[in-house]
Structures are given as structure tokens and as C-alpha cells.
Image: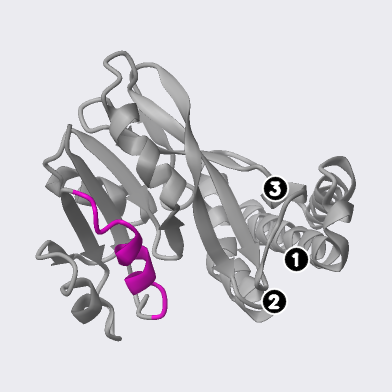
Amino acid sequence: MSLSVIIIAKNEARDIEDCLRSVDFADEIIVVDSESTDETCAIAEKYTPHVHSVPWKGFGPQKNHALDLATSDWILSLDCDERVSKQLREQLTTAMAQPDVAAYMVRFRSSYCGHFMRFGDWGGERKLRIFRRDAGRFDDAPVHEKIIIDGQVRTIGGTIDHYSVRSRADMQAKAAQYADLGAQAAFDAGRKATRTSAMCRGAFAFLRGYILKGGVLDGYRGFTLAIDIASSTRRKHAALARLCKRTHEA
């Protein structure tokens, strides 16, 4: 069984080399770049001849474009700030040989300000990232895209290590990037929000991550992560509330 790794990128020179190095065992690596202005493409070309420049279409469509370019039996979808662990690499050959499995969930270890979080919203995350090429496809969501699978899904051993946030400034920048995209997607799906509901959503996000999911056990970083996620949640729903208000006033 062969494996294609698909990666989408834009101005990821800081992260993409470590990502590519972690999957240098793959039969094929596909990188779809969204017109980067840094050294992303030059770095990627050291690891694969399959580097394609494509104008940005949204996360779902962009990943489907990469998927359409892949030729292997199995697909591993990675973001540039993610790394395949040695344990996951060792599990892949056996996992891909299972005839009755269409996809695998992978456990994530997510790093926040230099530390992997054990609890809270980022503790014990599992995401579907490995699937048969003929059994899965991304939806067309512009953000928070999902893989639609036709067949049985299991969980694989090993982890994907996610170096998502190096500092709280990183977290705030990501929140700003995703707030409007997430709000627009929610608005297009017919969801509603008000300034009050946005505040309540943010407050509940803090309670969920810090108390209900045990973020308190991660100490000070568990507290600040819960604060940052709450702020990001409030920000997205506040943006949705503004969209709803403008529509109501039109």
C-alpha cells in the first residue's frame, strides 16, 4: 500500500521544513501553496517535486485540490505546523494493510507556548487525518473543514505533534485570522448571534476548557489557554452578531 501526504501552505517558511522532514518516508508528498511570498516553495521543493501554486479558495477546496493531485492508495493530510511522530510512522504500514478500514483517527499532542497540553480543550484531541483515497473527501467549508468518509473508521496508535502556538501573540493572530471566516461560515449556515450571546459563548468556553475538561490541571498555561480560547470564541460570535445585525438593518 502506498501513501501520499497532502499539505496546503501559505507563507509557512518557519514551519514547513520540519513538517516535511517528518514525512520523508512517504511515497509521495503533495504541497499546494497559496501564492506564498516567503521561502515556502523553495523549501518544499527540496523534499518533493510536487509543489503547486494555486490561488486561495478556502480550506476545504484547497485540500480537495491537493487530494485530486495525489495518486497513492492512502492519504495523510497534514498542516505545516504538524509533525508525524516516530510511533505513528511505525504504525502506518500495518494500519494501511487492513482491508476493512477506510480511515483512521489520530491522537494529537498540541503545544501551547512551548508545552504540550495534557488537559483542557487541547488535551486528548483526536482528528481524522488518514484515509483511503477512494473513500474520503473534504467538504467545501472555507474554514474548519471536515473529511467525509464512506466506510469504517478506527483509531491508530502514535501521535501527530501540533506546534500550533508559540506565544500568546500567535494565539491572538490566529484568532483574528479565523474569527471572520468562522463567523461567515456560521452565518451562511443560518446561525444567529447577539452581543450578549457572544459573551455567554466566551464564558462557557472558559468554563468548559478550564473546569469541565480539567485545564486547571495544566497549571498557569491551562488557565491562559482557557482564557485565549474563550476570547477567540467570543470574538467569532461577536463577528457573527455584527453580520446578523447588518442583515436585520438592511
Looking at the image, is 58 positioned above or below residue 80?
above
Residue occupied by mark 2: 168
| Label 1 vs 3, first from the N-terminus | 3
Q: What residue type is labelled 2?
A: Arg
- Choose between 36 and 77: the one closer to the eye: 77
Residue occupied by mark 1: 228
Q: Give the range drawn in magenta.
A: 14-26
> Badges 1 and 3: C-beta atoms under 8 Å apart?
no
Q: Is residue 98 left or right of residue 29?
A: right
Where is the C terminus found, in terms of image quarters?
bottom right
Badge 2: few (under 14), some or many (20 or more) residues near its Cα, within 10 Å? Answer: some
Image disc number at residue 123: 3
Give the distance between the C-alpha atoms of the residues marked 1 and 3, in whole angstroms: 15 Å
- Front of the two marks 1 and 3: 3
> Badges 1 and 2: C-beta atoms under 8 Å apart?
yes
Image location (x, y in percent) of residue 30: 19, 56
Give the distance between the C-alpha atoms of the residues marked 1 and 2, in whole angstroms: 8 Å
Q: Is residue 76 left or right of residue 142?
A: left
Q: Could you say whether the residue bearing mark 1 is in a helix, strand or loop? A: helix
Looking at the image, is 23 positioned above or below residue 40?
above
Image location (x, y in percent) of residue 168: 69, 76
Quadrant in which residue 246 is drawn: bottom right
Q: Which residue is drawn at 73% across and 59% down?
A: 229
